[in-house]
Amino acid sequence: ACLGIHQVAFGYHEHTLPYRVWPTCPHDKNGLELMEYFLRGEQPDVLLLLNTLPVCNEWAALLRRKFRVMTPALAYYSAEGAPLSPEWFTTFRFLQKTVAWTEFTSQSARDAYNVQSDFVYMGVDHQAFHPYDDARRQSLRQAVGWDDRFVVLFVGRNMFAKQQDKVVEAASLLRREGHEDVLIHLQCKPFENFANGGWDLPSLCRHWDVREMISFPPDLRNQAYATPHFRDPETVNLSGDVLANLASLSLADRYNCADLYLHPSMVEGFSFPCAEAMACGVPIAHTDDSGVMNEVCGAAGHRLPRGADSTASWGSRYSVLSARDIADTILRVRDLLREKPEERQRLGGLGVKQSMRYDWDKTAASIMK
């Protein structure tokens, strides 16, 4: 049995999935209130806890202290930033095995708790995420009106830690300096209530006067519903409407249409978008976090210098970027690719090679051991 957050994508139903899903209280996203009923009903032989370390820690305490469950349990966990909070040590006391998503997180656990925690990388769907040939890429770019722009792509949630505000401000610097050929596509929900940790990005674009340089997905209004990873090219109907064409493209299509993938996040547990972009052969730039993003991207990415540190309430340090450094990195990559077009293939090749480290079959086989 796997304990984790479950969201059914639009158009799918739980009865079509290859596993049973227990309903959870709508006000309790992690399903903690119904855990006891789940365990009584399923009577599993092994429990897999799949979530962040703080959530796994809470589950571990409930299993052992409240429900008195002695079923063997494994936590396959992520942790965002370091150092780790001493309060999260319960996970390692109560469970038979713990495995981190990255070596950096495994080392952070050793530093914080003096425990041995293995690491196994998460995976990438390489059947969906792979480089397209030039003809297909150019036809898609033309269909969505991106063929005459230097396209920078970001994929992720609309939230404070992703620093989309810095990206919008960077666009204003580029506009003032005459670089309006740059188009930044923010593949995220355009508006998220600030009380929920997100941004009103259209308002920021109006404030910085960059509405012509920032675009949003026409098909994403709810973060619970993602853009499909893959669509059969034979079923994609392109028309003269660029917004309709963009809405019809898969996430893999959008990665391939980009000239640069930009990931300005303060912190990551693994950074799936970076791995997916690398698998698509897109040059990438990411936060120099001295941690997870540097590990996942290796030598494949340009590193955005950290301007300052921000400290979370539990003590972990996050990397804060400056709009100036983001703008300069975009210009540096743009100019490099224009002067030496062959560099796109070289940089993309580095990313593809790095992404081959991440494979779901390898992840599953390692966890099953």
Image (spheres, helix red, strand yellow):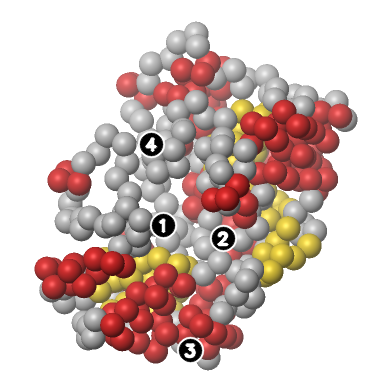
Q: Amino acid at mark 4?
A: Pro
Residue position for label 2: 268
Judge whether residue 107 can be spotted in this image: no
Out of 205 and 67, give the one closest to the viewer: 67
Residue 159, position as x, y percentages in the image:
58, 49
Q: Amino acid at mark 2?
A: Glu
What residue would you read off at disc 4? 228
**Left of 127 or right of it: where is 147?**
right
- How far apart marks 3 and 1 lie (CA) works out to 25 Å
Closer to the chain start, of discs 2 and 1, is 1
**Of labels 3 and 1, the one closer to you:** 3
Residue named by callout 1: 123
Residue 77 placement: quadrant: bottom left
Q: In the figure, residue 99 lies in which quadrant?
A: bottom left
Residue 165, image x, y percentages: 70, 44
Q: Nearer the viewer, mark 2 or mark 1?
A: 2
- Amino acid type at circle 1 is Gly
**Disc with the residue nearer the chain's start (3 vs 4):** 3
Q: Residue furthest top?
A: 240
Nearer the viewer's eye, disc 4 or disc 1? 4
Circle 2 crowding by C-alpha within 10 Å: few under 14, some 14–19, many from 20: some
Left or right of residue 257, residue 289 in this image:
right
Give how far across and how far down residue 6 sits, in percent.
31, 54
**Kind of residue at badge 3:** Val
**Dot 1: element:** loop
> Which mark sits nearer the N-terminus, 4 or 1?
1
Asked whether the beta carbons under mark 3 and mark 1 sit within 8 Å of each other, the answer is no
Query: CB under 8 Å between callouts 4 and 1?
Result: no
The residue under the point 61% across, 61% down is 267
Q: Position of residue 355 (x, y in %)?
A: 50, 53
Q: Give the left or right position of residue 15, taking residue 328 as reference.
A: left
Q: Which residue is mark 3?
A: 115
